[in-house]
Amino acid sequence: MERNPARKGQSEIMEYIVMVVLIVAAIIAIILFLSWWSIMQIEMQGSKNQNDKIVSLGQMIMGDYMLINEQAMLDDAKLTSLVSMSSEGCERLQALLGANWYAKIKSLDMEGDIPCTWGNYPDCNSWTICEYKEPHIAQVFPVNVYRKLSDKAALAVLEVGVYT
């Protein structure tokens, strides 16, 4: 029995079409995978950059001579002075250290959260440098706050964050 030459040609064309479709699908799948991979790498790098910024801001706050005393502890009077400068101080700090960040220090020697101003100093336990907004990413660091009037050190928590 002899095969029909028209069917043989049609079969070869179908094989060719199926092979081209599979190759195109494989190329599209590779392009989509590489695009997804690049996007994930960019997101991871952005997250790493935000974490690096948080850590460097935390180190700067914990080591800045304008905020610490001779014993390398955050000074409550200096923090109150900085917070009392309100938005002007924040704008200057953000011009110096970059935009979209905040810091909050909370001393654990009192109950509650009493924001510090010159009106209620030293009966307060919370200092917020540059108000924070949502959404943000933050890290918490243990620090000591020197209570100048009582000449004591208090355990505190420094929260540093950046806006996303």
Image (cartoon, rainbow, N blue to C red):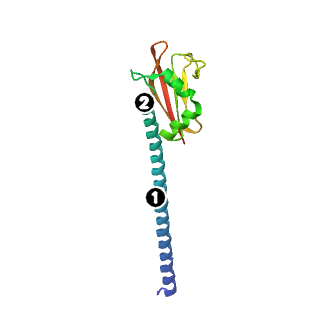
The answer to whether one can see residue 137 in this image is no
How many numbered discs? 2
How crowded pointer 2 is (Cα within 10 Å; few <14, some 14-19, many 20+) is rated as few
**Residue plotted at (52% across, 37% down):** 92
* Up/down of 56 relative to 113, above or below: below
How crowded pointer 1 is (Cα within 10 Å; few <14, some 14-19, many 20+) is rated as few
Numbered tag placed on residue 34 in the rendering: 1
**Residue plotted at (53% across, 23% down):** 80
Question: Could you say whether the residue bearing mark 1 is in a helix, strand or loop?
Answer: helix
Return the residue nearer the eye: 119 or 57.
Answer: 119
Residue 14 placement (x, y as % from top left) = 51, 77
Residue type at mark 1 is Leu
Q: Nearer the viewer, mark 1 or mark 2?
A: 2
Numbered tag placed on residue 1 in the rendering: none
Residue bearing the label numbered 2 = 64
Residue type at mark 2 is Asp
Q: Quarter holding the C terminus?
A: top right
